[in-house]
Image (cartoon, rainbow, N blue to C red):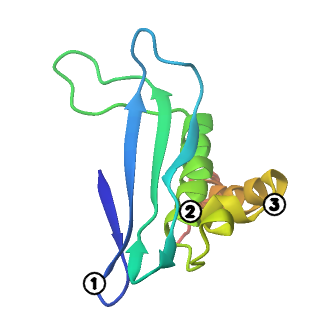
Amino acid sequence: IYQASNDRDEVVGYFYVDLFSRPGKRPGAWMDDAISRWRGGGHDQLPVAYLVCNFPEPGVGEIDSFLSHDEVQTFFHEMGHVLHHVLTKVDVMGVSGINGVSGMLSSFRASSWRIFVGIGELYRRFPVIR
């Protein structure tokens, strides 16, 4: 589990990560909310999300797991959804985080994080000469 904090070092939410494939695990990659943010009656409920992927595990005796370009894009896309949910400032449970937008708009916002993957690809193809 990871915690997200603001610039004042206050915890604003949490997220779980399950990155690697295993027998019996549903295929694909997705995120979902476990708990939505809300305030009421003197209680502050922080949001909790989870991110699930099926990336290849490192080989026996290896530390690193290398991802394809598509897998990196998938990770950034799903992580965009996680950030949207965890960083919400909306205090009404029914519309906070990923609950507050249609699926199409939510995917558009999450896809914007994939731009960082594209920037890396540009640097790989066209290295900066100094």
Q: Residues within 10 Å of mark 3 (few under 14, many from 20)?
A: few
According to the picture, the residue beneath numbered tag 3 turns out to be 105
Q: Kindly indicate the quadrant of the structure image that contains residue 74.
A: top right
Query: In the drawing, does residue 49 fall left or right of residue 95?
Result: left
- Which mark sits nearer the N-terminus, 3 or 2? 2
Mark 3 to mark 1 CA distance (whole Å): 30 Å
Say which amino acid is labelled 1: Asp
Answer above or below: position of 121 versus 128.
Answer: above
Task: Please name whichever residue, 37 or 101, is drawn nearer the observer in this view of the structure.
Answer: 37
Say which amino acid is labelled 3: Leu
Say which amino acid is labelled 2: His
Location of residue 2 in the rendering, given as x and y in whole percent from the top left corner:
31, 56
The circle on residue 85 is: 2
Q: How many marks?
A: 3
Mark 2 to mark 1 CA distance (whole Å): 18 Å
- Which mark sits nearer the N-terminus, 3 or 1? 1
Q: Kindly indicate the quadrant of the structure image that contains residue 41.
A: bottom left
Q: Give the SS element for disc 1.
A: loop
Location of residue 40 in the rendering, given as x and y in whole percent from the top left corner:
49, 79
Residue depicted at x 46% and y 46% = 50
- Which mark sits nearer the N-terminus, 2 or 1? 1
Task: Please name whichever residue, 1 or 45, is drawn nearer the observer in this view of the structure.
Answer: 45
Taking the view exactly as shown, the residue that stands out farthest to the top is: 23
According to the picture, the residue beneath numbered tag 1 turns out to be 9
Location of residue 76 in the rendering, given as x and y in whole percent from the top left corner:
56, 51
